[in-house]
Image: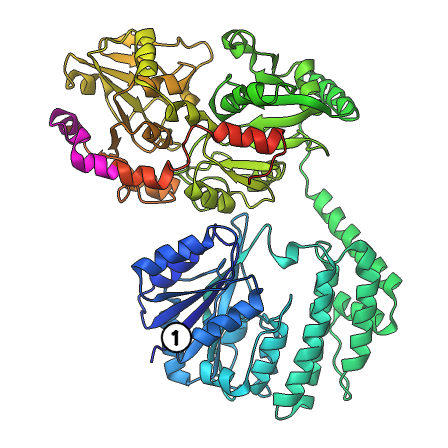
Amino acid sequence: MTLLSVVLPVYKVQGYLSQCLDSLLEQPFTDFEIVAVDDCSPDNSGAILAEYAARDPRVRVVSLAENVGLGRARNAGLDHATGEYVWFVDSDDWLAQGALTAVADRLADTDADVLIVGFDRVHWDGRVTPSGSVKALAEAPESFTVEQWPRVLNVLHVAWNKVVRRDLLVKLGFRFEEGWYEDVSFTFPLLSAAPRISGLARVCVHYRQRRTGAITRTLGDRHFEIFDHWAHAMALVDQYADRPEALRPALFQRMIWHYLTVLRNAQRVKKASRKRFFDRITEDFHRYKPAQGYEPPPGAQGLRHKFVARGSFFAFRTLQRVIGVVKSTERVRKLPLVKAKGLVKRVRQAAYRAYYKLQLRLPVDDRLALYAAYWYRGVTCNPAAIASKAEELAPGVRNVWVVGRARAASVPPGTDYVVAGSLAYYRALARARWLVNNVNWPNWVVKRPGATHVMTHHGTPLKMMGMDQADHPAAAKDQNFHAQMRRADRWDFSITANTHTTIAWERAYPCRHETLEVGYPRNDRLAGATPADAAGVREKLGIRPDERVILYTPTHREWLPRGRQVLDVEAFADRLGPDTVLLVRAHYFYVAPDQRVQTRRGRVVDVSAYPVVEDLYLAADVMMTDYSSAMFDFAVLDRPLVIYAPDWEAYRELRGVYFDLMELPPGEVATTFSGLVDVFADGSYASADATAKRARFRERFCYLDDGKAAERVVRRVLLGELAG
């Protein structure tokens, strides 16, 4: 018999599921199975489970025909479990290294019926806080009953920190109830019935504190379900405990603490429902107060108990407000003084912002769509493709671009635009019905009712982005993740190129928006490109038809000094032969506003400032890159790709990546200069093996590139059409 069955209920966790599964499957201890219950998840979670199950027999998937909720999904997993013990792990959390070995050793030493493990809290902004569970469990006896050590009731009342003997669950007929707070009516009766409990005083579970999606961050009357679950828990404790009266004081304390914790959280109970919630607490206070009395907690918590006992909501609310004022005063005292400098600039900005706020009071212009790309660098990328298609499909919409002052001269003729920082710019930002950008708008921009923000992004992610950068501070240029998330909170739509991107963005930007997994609009031109299109671009660039063109697109490395390159392009070009042209396009961070569009030095052409990167893709016979997202776009053309990765190990560790490029490259890989030269000298860059690698890469990342991505966006966003 397998020692352990890990029951994994899965619903809308595509951004976290792989991390959870990897944390289990990569443990050195192997005597376990994963019973993953796909609770009819509407996202890509089911596909992720199928992929893991196909490559590891320890993963078994139970697929439910309809969504039944967390409790019943756990019950379904329990029905399929075969292990001696069952561990109900939540699929957005993950296990610490060595956790399974430590659990197995502790079970062998104690023969426990219930093993409670320690955990920490990992917040969405990267903070990790200890839970107190490790310290509490360290003070517990080696094995005990709940009557012998009632402090166990204060360890978080969830299922995922308890490893339970399966026979005990079957014998007692324990099942999870439906609804929110279902762990309450499971945990406390289980602890009261368990003949032998033990604790493991080490962090085994990393408990994810999600920014969105958790019931602790959901406002509504469903939080009233807590009362039913506590009533059921109390009844079951009376049924299973040998001496339930001995547990009453500790259990009562925990119940009131739980009620007050929910009530005090403004993100849970609606303001209009708080008095009614408080009254329910008062009812349960008198219904379940131990006959022998109990020791009220000290301090403010004790005052809350008194107000609950009296049914005085006014006094309770007054206490909460006083505590809030005290905390706010302490925060103000800690604020640093702002130095008075740049006064003229700040006065001008204040005047323009005042004008912006005035414009916000005027109606939204239902015909105005405002576009921007790369921090106002020009008319390009996904926003440009959407604007072009909007002119065709939504002629009633006025399309206006925001460009920087230095870029105004490069705006295509006939394109309506405003200059960033001008009064027209502030007016357009305040009044536009649609705001489309491939990066975020400035922090001060207000998301007003009636306006729709569209984040198009500007690449398929290999490197980690958003919140995922918290674990890679060397590469995080902006480490104010709270500000990042506030900007992302303005999105109504997030456009993704493929399932991989959808999953990555969900974890990197845990905000409430609709994902449009439709492909990147900028690639529509590549999907429909003809040989004549490529020939036209080459002629425009001055490249002969018989010349081989290699496009080199290195990415940005935050930790290298500005200007340092990983490849000597002149030396490399000298090894390519006289009939090869090397187009070099530096990352846009390195392009000055006044830089020439193209500069030729022998066989090397600097096209870093060339405005339309898709032209360069069409002109190239081969792309050579390192870790740039340009590889995903160029792959649409199904032309040879070469990866030059001399510092892959450093990049992977410092920058963080979503998948191993060395395991799934789009073509041949070189890690040294001589190896790179050989790839082109012997023709292996275009070999059958390279073609097969590219086909596998395209199958995963380019399957939506059919030339209609921009149309799908325009129809959904500007025309309001729903997908059929």
What is the three-letter code of the residue carrying label 1? Leu
- At which x and y percent is residue 351? 74, 18
Quadrant in which residue 314 is drawn: bottom right
Residue at x-position 38% and y-position 23%: 528
Q: Residue 581: image x %, image y %?
A: 23, 14
Q: Which residue lies furthest to the front in this view?
A: 724
The reply to whether the magenta stretch includes residue 690 is yes
Residue 322 falls in image quadrant: bottom right
Q: Is residue 641 left or right of residue 506?
A: left
Task: Tell me which segment is drawn in magenta.
Answer: 675-693
**Quadrant in which the C terminus is drawn:** top right
Q: Quadrant of residue 102?
A: bottom left
Q: Where is residue 569 in the image (x, y as percent from the top left)?
A: 24, 19
**Number of marks in the rendered image:** 1
Q: Mark 1 points at which residue?
A: 4
Q: Is residue 357 left or right of residue 674?
A: right
The structure residue drawn at horizontal position 55% and vertical position 84%, both measured from the top left corner, is: 173
